[in-house]
Image (cartoon, rainbow, N blue to C red):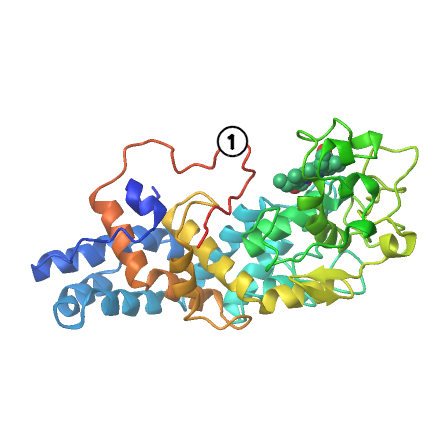
Amino acid sequence: MRPLALSACAALLAACVGDKPPPDPAARSEEVRTYLSALAPILVSRTLSADEIALIEQKVADEGQIAVARQVLSGWLGEPALADAARELIQTRLSVSGSGIDGVNYELPGNLAAWTVVNGAPWSTLVTADFCVGDDLSMIECDSGAPYTAGLLTTRAYLKARASRFNLTRASTLLNVFACQRYPVPQEVEPSIAKERLRAMFQANTPEEQEDPAAADAFGNGFGCYNCHSQFAWHAQLFVQFDQDGLFRPDATGLQDPEGELGRSVGGLFASHLADPAEAASPASQMLGVPVADLGEAGRVLGESQVMTECMARNILEYGAGLEPGAKIAAELISEIAAELSPGQATFADLVLAVFGNQRVYQTLVEGIRHPAPPADEAAPAPGDGEQGSEEQS
Ligand code: HEC
């Protein structure tokens, strides 16, 4: 299915909705039909039914466009295909799916996403579940062997697919996909760790401050290590007990392997950002300013947060509207949508209704359908922006 074509204005989903609804009732119905026809294949894998079309034609004149759009959307929320949309969204955002020749089941994250929809569980279960979900959507034990769990974050699928030096890719993916943030994160969202707790190479903010020859000219222009890595340090630390195969290793030290590549610890583990050996070995850290004992607690803090609720609304909007991850979307619009949702409790279905039943989302996407943008890619992330932008500033 072709994604919704967005006008340049619509791609920003900013407050550029000057257009009034068409005066003619038939045209108003037609507009609702166009909007829902574009969403149905993505959200429920089908076209509009004859009953839905009839309902739109009969009711829009009296009840208004949004009320009728919400009625039709509500009807979709119990359909089994919605679980497939949830699965696909997560699998696409994480680029994790399939069953590996390495014996790792890369479907576990997608299975959990589908399970939450089938069982009406909060979408935050993605990062809070203390169980995993098999391919038949039954609850199973998780596969990393860790004594703590954080939904899909503690599946081998996530841990292995995102394994990298210093655990940076596990950390940045967590932050991109579930908090819609990139480093450096605003201090209100994640206060930095104290400089003296970091390994020397991450303390520097200028090349002159760089004491560690390993980092002297290796990364970027040598500036600002502390700005980003003082927050990275917290999130990377949560993964210090998982080796490159995604297995829990109680013997992890977080110490740099003196013989190994920078950022690697011994035995297929990764090095910590932290200088003190006791701190480097510990999974205790901080998530969104809250001290946590391990990744399990971090997942619960994240799951309950307004940050994740808003990020999930954004992900669903991007997915349903065919926008690139990190597309420019007005921060006020995301807050307005999230105001309808209770953090930690909102289900995928609640999110879909809040996003696509929103007046401004409706108007902006309809505007894009009326005046499609030329096939340019100004909306694409700038080179070097990474997989996800966080350009939205209020
Ligand atoms: C603007 C934020 C930012 C700044 C400034 C920054 N980094 Fe990074 N750094 C990142 C990101 C993002 C990654 C990639 C994480 C990932 O794998 O997803 C990264 C990766 C790394 C890696 C791992 C590279 C690899 O190939 O695995 C090292 C080591 C590192 N940075 C050190 C430094 C040092 C030293 C400095 C200062 C000279 C620095 N960084 C400055 C954000 C930053």
Task: State the residue position of label 1.
Answer: 383
* Placement of 131 over or under 202, stated as above or below: below
- Residue 138: percent from left, percent from top: 63, 66
Q: Residue at x 13, y 72 (%)?
A: 62
- Residue 327: percent from left, percent from top: 43, 45
In this view, which residue lies farthest toward the left?
A: 24
- Residue 143: percent from left, percent from top: 75, 57
Q: State the quadrant of the N terminus.
A: top left
Q: Is residue 105 visible?
A: no
Q: Residue at x 87, y 54 (%)?
A: 281
In which of the image's four quarters is ligand 1 placed? top right
Q: State the quadrant of the C terminus.
A: bottom left
Who is closer to the viewer here, 339 or 186?
186
* Residue 340 quadrant: bottom left
- Residue 12: percent from left, percent from top: 35, 46
* Placement of 256 over or under 190, stated as above or below: above
Q: Residue at x 39, y 59 (%)?
A: 332
Who is closer to the viewer here, 305 or 138?
305
What type is the residue that disc 1 sits on?
A: Pro
* Residue 55 quadrant: bottom left
